[in-house]
Image (cartoon, rainbow, N blue to C red):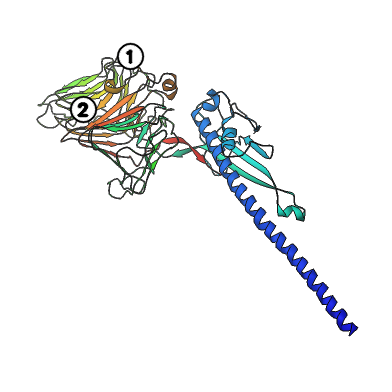
Amino acid sequence: MRAGKESGKEKGQALLLVVVAMSLFLIAALGLVMDGAQIYGHRQMAQDAADAAAQAGIMSIFTGTNVTGGSPFGTGTNPGPHTCTTTDPITPCVYARNNQFGGTAADTIVISYPKTAPGVNLATSPDPANTANIIQVNITRTLNTGIMKMLGSATSTVTAVAVAAVVDVVNPVPILVLHPNLSGAFMINGTPTITICGGPTRSIQVNSISTTSIITKGGSNTVDLSRAGPLDSGTCNTGTGADFGDFGGPVNYPSTLLTGVGQYVQPASPIDDPLLSVAAPAVPGTAGTQTTITVAAVTRYGCPAGQQCTLYTPGLYASGIDVKNDWALFTPGIYYISGGGFNLESNSAATMATGTGAPPAGFTNGPGMLVYNTGSAAGDVFNFTSNAGSKGPVTLIGSDDTSAYKGILFFQDRGSVKHVDNKGHLLQGGGTISLTGTIYVTNTVATMKGDATHYQTLQLQGNPGSTTTIIGEIITDNLQLGGTAGIKMNLNPNSNLHIRQVALVR
């Protein structure tokens, strides 16, 4: 009997030990679940905070406000790492705090500026005082554990790393509006339909930070990007859509926007002027000439039979070029206009001359032209009146994409006087207008930041019975689209424009 009682007692003790062991296991498991959930949640929040801080920091570097603002950071040739304080005013530290990290001693936020990022093609900063183009944010938070503390682990650490950079990509944007803060930087009046075919995944970018950077008025108008994008073959039939990017606002596009697989992106980080490095041509040593091609002339240079034309040659035009009641033939080369502007007026036509020799200096393949426009008078603009093209077509070809002028057709002096609103550049017409090449009319961003009223306006209009087609890009400070007919852009598939843009690369 005694042996049986002792055996039962031992079994009871063993059962108690099993219960205790199971309890400890369950406590550990519960602690792992509860504290693990806390650690996981904080790690996700830390990553979100690091991403936000890195993106805000790189945007400040991209726009130069990290140099000009009251709390500069990341400037100079070799910026060192910076550890945020709990009240640190620099942008990445502020954004980390806005996302609940960096406000207590439990958090460590370190901002650094690596020189390289694996697999990333970095852009070169245009500002010698601001050479940083990568920012890395490391966040560490020490957490007090709960139940796991009973097992000897009183704290746990979560970490997060984010890297953002200014990258260089070959990715031309058909319409790029550069003014940094103008209301109505992109404006549509009337009832035009603007169609973009082909090109990259983003067709339009408006850089203005204004909440009303896009304004549409005056009727039902449409921006159709449904056939844009890299899948289009140039026929406007195979594209599947592209994005419309806007930095400032409005939050929703204010009229009809067709994007296909693309979308309206707001806010969309600004894109720098991709042609800023293209130097203005030198002032020619000789004047351009104008020669009348009579109806009876044997050598026609592309002048239609039975038509009288004027043959223009490259060179300096001190009083501008005015085509009125005439058919203009332009010999390939550089037309440097120092005053008077480039004007196509009523009953005009303008085409490229044929049979006029080798590609011009600075061009690679020809047979295009570059019109460089400067001057200090109000009328020193590119101007196509409402009846331009009524005598015949306007079909002009710009410099080739592989040349020093990177496909530009119309090039406005970046340092020129302002030409704004109805005193700006005007491209309209009463006939067929087809322009192959980039329309580049802009002052520098530094000029516009110094004086917001000093910029270049480009008005592009299609009128009844007319078609305006642009094969290339439009780069301007203020774009105003209008009229009642179609405006079609078909991005040149051979374009080789590099742009700087920000990206979260880790």
Along the horizontal axis of the image, is 153 left or right of 45? right
What crowding class fits label 1: few (fewer than 14 Cα within 10 Å), some (14-19), or many (20 or more)?
Answer: few
Of the residues shown, which amino acid type is indicated by label 2?
Answer: Leu
Badge number at residue 25: none
- 85 left or right of 411? right
> Looking at the image, is mark 2 or mark 1 nearer the viewer?
1
What is the x, y in percent for residue 188? 28, 32
From the viewer's side, name the closer residue of 339 and 376.
376
Q: Quadrant of residue 109?
A: top right
Residue at the outermost right position = 2
Q: Assign the N terminus to one quadrant of the image.
A: bottom right
Looking at the image, which residue is at 17% across and 30% down?
Answer: 389
Sequence order check, earlier mark of 2 and 1: 2
The image quarter containing residue 180 is top left
Image-quadrant location for residue 187: top left
Mark 2–mark 1 distance (CA, rounded to whole Å): 27 Å
Query: At numbered mark 2, what does the secondary structure look like: helix, strand or loop?
Result: strand
Give the residue pinned by disc 2: 329
Q: Amino acid at mark 1?
A: Ser
Q: Which residue is mark 1?
A: 376
The answer to whether one can see residue 482 in this image is: yes
Q: Point out the image quarter for the C terminus.
A: top right
Q: Position of residue 131 (x, y in %)?
A: 56, 29
Which is more toward the observer, 132 or 50?
A: 50
Is residue 341 left or right of 154 when viewed as pictured? left
Comparing 201 with 267, the one in front is 267
Q: Is residue 492 above or below residue 64?
A: below
Residue placed furthest toward the bottom: 1
Please state if 262 lies on the left or on the right of 221 as rendered.
Answer: right
Looking at the image, residue 212 lies above or below residue 285: below
Residue 397 appears anywhere in the view: no
